[in-house]
Amino acid sequence: AILGPFADQRAVDALNHTLGVDRPLLVQYWSWISNFVQGDMGTSYIFRSPVAPFVIDALGNSMKLAAVAFVLVVPIGILGGVIAALNLNRPLDRIISLGGLSVTVLPEFVTGIILILIFGVWLRWLP
């Protein structure tokens, strides 16, 4: 994709050598880890510039999202655990345990679709 569909084998081999993909996988991985620890996250082939500034720019929003998720999930989890413990071996305990387990084992994209369906489509709380 970098060289285009009509690149000859010599150009492909040269690019593979430049990128280091002609080396053994463990050597590539060790090189990447060593560079990452030193702050070199690699180069974006789309923008032809280091990746680190893009990651740093997105880190602020990611931290905000993580903080909001933490503030929402921790109280809900504690409250659910207390309610389940107070109703040990009763239907409410089973429902809360099943709900918590379901959210834990489902992939995030499935959980997200279900939450969008509930809050966006059925309850119309989202635009």
Image (cartoon, grey):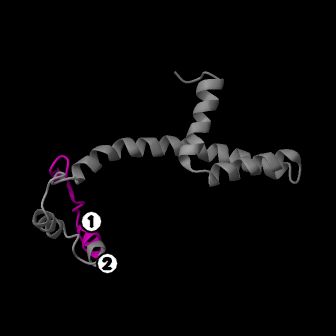
From the viewer's perspective, is the residue at label 2 or at label 1 nearer?
2
Q: Name the quadrant containing residue 118.
A: top right
- Please report the residue visible at 58 percent of the width from the left and 26 percent of the height from the top: 120
Q: Helix or strand or loop: what does disc 1 sit on?
A: helix
Whether residues under marks 2 and 1 lie with C-beta atoms below 8 angstroms apart, the answer is: no
- Where does the image place residue 7, in percent across and percent down from the top left? 13, 57
Label located before the other in sequence (2 or 1): 2
- Where does the image place residue 85, in percent across and percent down from the top left? 81, 52
Mark sitting on residue 26: 2
Mark 1 is surrounded, within 10 Å at the Cα level, by few (under 14), some (14 to 19) or many (20 or more) other residues, namely: few
Q: Which amino acid is tagged 2? A: Leu
91 shown above or below 24: above
108 shown above or below 16: above
Of residue 106 and residue 95, the one placed in the foreground of this image is: 106
- Where does the image place residue 14, in percent across and percent down from the top left? 11, 67
Please name the residue that numbered disc 1 is placed on: 36
Q: CA distance from mark 2 to mark 1?
A: 15 Å
- Please report the residue visible at 40 percent of the width from the left and 46 percent of the height from the top: 63
Q: Which amino acid is tagged 1? A: Phe
Q: Which residues are magenta?
A: 30-49
